[in-house]
Image: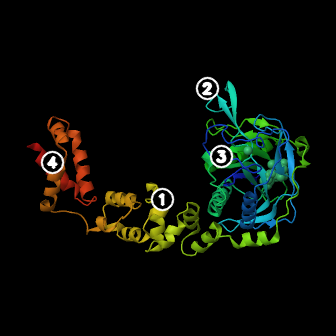
């Protein structure tokens, strides 16, 4: 039998507000442990939460970007569980009346993913596992808690089970990440934990539209690991069904290190959380004027730009440019479209230069001349594109320097500038020849004929 995967995602993003969700503690990643706390986020008795208006605006903006309906009336609930990172013994979250519902998000391949909801909540504190465990709970001898993170505004986005492959899930996540970054509502950096996601996976016979039991992979910290985890989970479930078994609903912790996903816990049911409306907060009723003003603030979104660029490039290239944040530069760089796109996605991408630092016209000149410049010089020039005052001209002067008369003074200059290396070479360290060649190439922006440089150097170093 052929099996078809069914995938749904739950994505958490930290909002980039100045202060926490329900108190005025400053948010600062990397601040000294427990230095950004107050009686509210430490859950002292008698304290009361006051919602952060900016976090609500950011969530509405995101709701618009996800083509959600922003509800007329939304309610905060308490979600109870017991863990040292949750000082109140409950998390203020949203349950059956989330702020944003019924959205959709278009992918570059033309498919659409349903957005069930996007709701606002607060993050828990951070447990730090100490002692010989590499930060993991298994093998740790004690756990410390950093309450700086407690109360960080967090949006949870839940998708419909509309994704059909690990590759599609990865692309969805990349595009969503780029979208929230461009909206300016989150850094969405996985290393910092400001973007985290859970992946729900089930399979079904191809052609069927039933929904079978799913498992949930938690603690994903990279798009590639997520894709790997999904692949492995699909295989595991196929194995179970094909040997006559049943998949059990459970939560798995994906450990990219050992490629296994041991069960974490069996899934809590909603009743285990004893949800109840937060009595200390009034219902959230966003003004329609605010909602409409925020709709007007939406910039052109990555998805729309991919669609626009896909007309002149192929979809993959357009998607790559946009999700890597290079498409604005691409649009400014003059030259043959496909060549510019390819250089930006390959050789130039490898330099790590910040797109914002680049003079697009100069980069265009360089790309235009790429076939006339030696490879090494081209690479070196690309690396220099982020430097202030970068001029392609310096690397373009027509072709290689072939004349001995032109190279000789340069070679002499390099030898004069490096007397101790010259002595070492003459003392037997002949490996230094490469160093001298490199220096001459540098002086000439890589345009010197390397064979000739070698010959000249050997000759001059003999003496
Ligand atoms: P819960 O509230 O228990 O977390 P939901 O039903 O709201 O569960 O679904 C959570 C996530 O699981 C959503 O992203 C949804 O798309 C996904 N999901 C639900 N059913 C399936 C299924 N059969 N296969 C894969 N994903 C699923
Ligand atoms: Mg869930
Ligand atoms: Zn606080």
Residue 442 position in % (x across, y down): 27, 55
Nearer the observer, 135 or 436: 135
> Mark 1 sits on what residue?
354
Residue 248 position in % (x across, y down): 83, 41
Residue lying furthest left: 463
Q: Residue at x 63, y 47 (%)?
A: 28
Q: What whole-number distance in Å separates the C-alpha atoms at marks 2 and 1? A: 38 Å
Relative placement, left or right, of 360 versus 140 is left
- Please give the label number shown on residue 193: 3
Q: Label 4: few (<14), some or many (≥20) within 10 Å?
A: few
**Can see residue 112?**
no
Q: Residue at x 77, y 45 (%)?
A: 216
- Please give the label number shown on residue 132: 2
Q: What whole-number distance in Å separates the C-alpha atoms at marks 1 and 3? A: 23 Å
Choose top left, top right, bottom left or bottom right for residue 70. bottom right
Q: Label 2: few (<14), some or many (≥20) within 10 Å?
A: few
**Can see residue 322?**
yes
């Amino acid at each position: 039998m052929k099996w078809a995967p069914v995938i749904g995602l739950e994505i958490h993003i930290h909002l980039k507000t100045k202060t926490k969700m329900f108190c005025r503690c400053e948010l600062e990643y990397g601040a000294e442990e427990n230095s950004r706390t107050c009686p509210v986020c430490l859950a002292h008795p008698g304290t009361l939460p006051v919602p952060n208006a900016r976090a609500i605006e950011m969530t509405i903006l995101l709701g618009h970007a996800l083509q959600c309906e922003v509800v007329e009336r939304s309610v905060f609930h308490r979600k109870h569980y017991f863990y040292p990172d949750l000082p109140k013994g409950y998390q203020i979250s949203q349950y059956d009346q989330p702020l944003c519902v019924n959205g959709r998000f278009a992918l570059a391949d033309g498919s659409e993913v349903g957005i069930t909801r996007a709701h606002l909540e607060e993050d828990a504190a951070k447990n730090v596992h100490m002692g010989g465990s590499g930060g993991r709970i298994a093998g740790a001898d004690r756990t410390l808690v950093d309450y700086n993170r407690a109360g960080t505004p967090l949006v949870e986005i839940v998708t419909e089970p509309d994704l059909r492959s690990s590759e599609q899930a990865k692309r969805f996540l990349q595009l969503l990440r780029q979208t929230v970054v461009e909206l300016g509502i989150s850094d969405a950096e996985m290393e910092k934990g400001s973007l985290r996601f859970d992946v729900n996976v089930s399979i079904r016979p191809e052609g069927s539209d039933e929904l079978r039991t799913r498992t949930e992979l938690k603690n994903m910290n990279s798009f590639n690991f997520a894709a790997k985890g999904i692949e492995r989970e699909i295989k595991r479930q196929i194995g179970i069904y094909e040997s006559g078994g049943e998949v059990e609903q459970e939560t798995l912790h994906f450990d990219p290190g050992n490629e296994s996903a041991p069960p974490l816990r069996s899934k809590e049911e909603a009743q285990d959380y004893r949800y109840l409306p937060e009595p200390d907060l009034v219902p959230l009723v966003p003004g329609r004027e605010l909602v409409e003003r925020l709709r007007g603030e939406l910039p052109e979104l990555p998805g729309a730009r991919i669609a626009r660029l896909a007309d002149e490039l192929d979809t993959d290239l357009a998607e790559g440019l946009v999700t890597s944040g290079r498409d604005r530069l691409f649009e400014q760089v003059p030259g043959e479209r496909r060549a510019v796109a390819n250089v930006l996605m390959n050789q130039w991408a490898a330099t790590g230069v910040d797109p914002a630092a680049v003079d697009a016209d100069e980069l265009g000149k360089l790309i235009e001349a790429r076939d006339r410049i030696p490879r090494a010089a081209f690479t070196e020039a690309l690396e220099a594109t982020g430097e202030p005052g970068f001029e392609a001209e310096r690397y373009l002067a027509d072709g290689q320097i072939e004349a001995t008369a032109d190279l000789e003074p340069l070679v002499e200059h390099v030898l004069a500038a490096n007397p101790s290396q010259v002595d070492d070479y003459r003392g037997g360290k002949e490996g230094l020849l490469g160093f001298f060649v490199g220096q001459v190439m540098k002086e000439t922006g890589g345009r010197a004929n390397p064979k000739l440089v070698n010959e000249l150097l050997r000759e001059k170093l003999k003496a």
